[in-house]
Amino acid sequence: MNQVLQFKSALREAVPSSAYLLEDEAQRAYEADWRGIVDNPSVAVLLPGSVAEVSAMMTLCASHDIAVVPQGGNTGLAAGAVPVGNLPQVVLSLRRMNKIRSVSPVNNTMEIEAGVILQAAQEEAARFDRLLPLSLAAEGSCQIGGAIATNAGGIQVLSYGSMRNLVLGLEVVLPDGRIWNGMRSLRKDNTGIDLKQVFIGSEGILGIITAAALRIFPRPKKALTVLVACDSAHNALRVFLETQQACGSDLTSCEYLTQAGLDLVHHHLPASRPPFQESHPAYVLMEMSSLDTAADLPARLEPLLMRLHENGIVRDVIVAQSESQRLALWQLREALSEGERAAGGAVKHDVAVPVAGIPQTIAAIERGLPEVAPGARLNIFGHLGDGNLHVNVMPPAEVAFGDFLAQARRVTAFIEENVIGAGGTFSAEHGIGQLRVESLKNHRAPLELELMRAIKGAIDPQWMMNPGKVLNQCN
Ligand SMILES: Cc1cc2nc3c(=O)[nH]c(=O)nc-3n(C[C@H](O)[C@H](O)[C@H](O)COP(=O)(O)OP(=O)(O)OC[C@H]3O[C@@H](n4cnc5c(N)ncnc54)[C@H](O)[C@@H]3O)c2cc1C
């Protein structure tokens, strides 16, 4: 009997049938990434319901030389949660491990299994009048474990930091099946190397995150959302800097988008209305929030925006007057990725530069792209306050996305060159997955790669966890 058949037979004996899928048709739903650009077969899909089952499955995989691809909500944008080609791999989905173990409004923490959907975790925190501040457009599908494994960012990093800042403790099953219980809900703990940090952002190449202890916060009582129209990225940045100066940490979100992005959203969601009568080159979507029920947020923001309008930095402003208007403004931002996907897709880049360098970086990309990919269309949006932009390059209107992919390498090299030249990074929040392995090799120092490989080899000596993602074994 070959290795795969032996594994399947051992799996049937070791775990109940509710904890795996072995039919090709059922497995297919777990094999393609969110963008639909990578699709490779799996030997089986494992659906553990407890940490003990994860441990048993990992031991079984290790003893049969079967590689393991951890999968959360499969919303990752670097194809990290789906198999690579030509290797016997199982997909291990955490979706059945979806219990909230406890919420402590006194300690301001929650203990939660990895398969809980982010939005469900936010809602549970809200029941205790607390805020779990990680928020991103995929929150209705992505899982806590996936958000930790990618160190997800989103729209409130400005105030609360990315996922790394929210994790106090972890429970992890190692590649050999051993369980590391690091579920400490402490804000201070200087007892040796902080092991959880190694697993946060490790994209499933070191072990399976099965649960986490997370920080939660008092829930803001008031919010004010505004959409500001500007004539350039330069002025959009000035709006952010002046608002941050005036509002400090009460400015919880600051997002950037352009008319190209809004056009994609309106095309995809015909019911959405253009926010302004005129089109503008650049928009800033900002949200202020406060714990103070008596806070008069409009009185703080509106005089500032009026001054910026008088100085020609702001062209127009919409201030949300109700919760439904607030949600409608946020929908314009959150539907950008969906709108782009519905329009055929883009060669995506998730870059960050020091905030001051944003206008110059955008200008350099806009100037140089027509030479690199004539007719290609840019959709640039992102987390302005974090210096994090999604620089997405769509094919010329008459070219299909599949045909445009031949130019992807050249386009990516051009974008990365500009970003690295500006002191930035080629992956701010989406990670490496299987789409940016070469970029990591090109842009991180040999010593950094050597240290990463040493950590990988120490925890996963057989390189069985999520092969082909982040690092290659040999180079
Ligand atoms: C519309 C849209 C908007 C997005 N916006 C943002 C954004 O603003 N900010 C941002 O940071 N990201 C964003 N993303 C990317 C993505 O949603 C996040 O990275 C998300 O956190 C991934 O979670 P997931 O559960 O879907 O993980 P998956 O896609 O399933 O997995 C991602 C990686 O984590 C690994 N993994 C998953 N679960 C585990 C686990 N339990 N243990 C170990 N490894 C695991 C996988 O192997 C894979 O390498 C967006 C995606 C979409 C589709």
Image (cartoon, grey):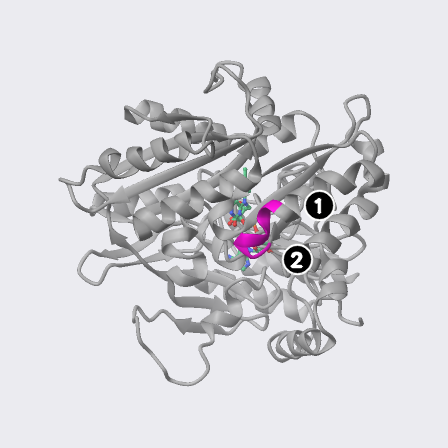
Would you say residue 132 is visible in this rendering? no
**Mark number displayed over residue 167:** none
Looking at numbered disc 1 in the image, what kind of residue is underneath it?
Ala
**Does residue 104 lie above or below 446 as drawn?**
above
Q: Nearer the viewer, residue 132 or 13?
A: 132
Q: Name the residue under label 1.
A: 364
**Mark number displayed over residue 422:** 2
Q: Where is residue 471 in the image (x, y as percent from the top left)?
A: 71, 66
Would you say residue 274 is visible in this rendering? yes
Element on which disc 2 rests = loop
Split into 4 quadrants, where in the image is the C terminus?
Answer: bottom right
Other residues around mark 2 within 10 Å, as few (<14) / some (14–19) / many (≥20)? some
Q: Where is residue 427 in the image (x, y as percent from the top left)?
A: 63, 55
Q: Where is residue 147 in the image (x, y as percent from the top left)?
A: 49, 53
Q: How many marks?
A: 2
| Residue sitting at x 61%, y 56% | 431
Element on which disc 1 rests = helix
Q: Position of residue 337 (x, y in %)?
A: 58, 34
Asked if disc 2 and disc 1 are in contact, CB closer than 8 Å, the reply is yes
Looking at numbered disc 2 in the image, what kind of residue is underneath it?
Ala
| Residue sitting at x 50%, y 39% | 236
Q: How far apart are the alpha carbons under marks 2 and 1?
A: 10 Å
Q: Give the range drawn in magenta.
A: 353-359
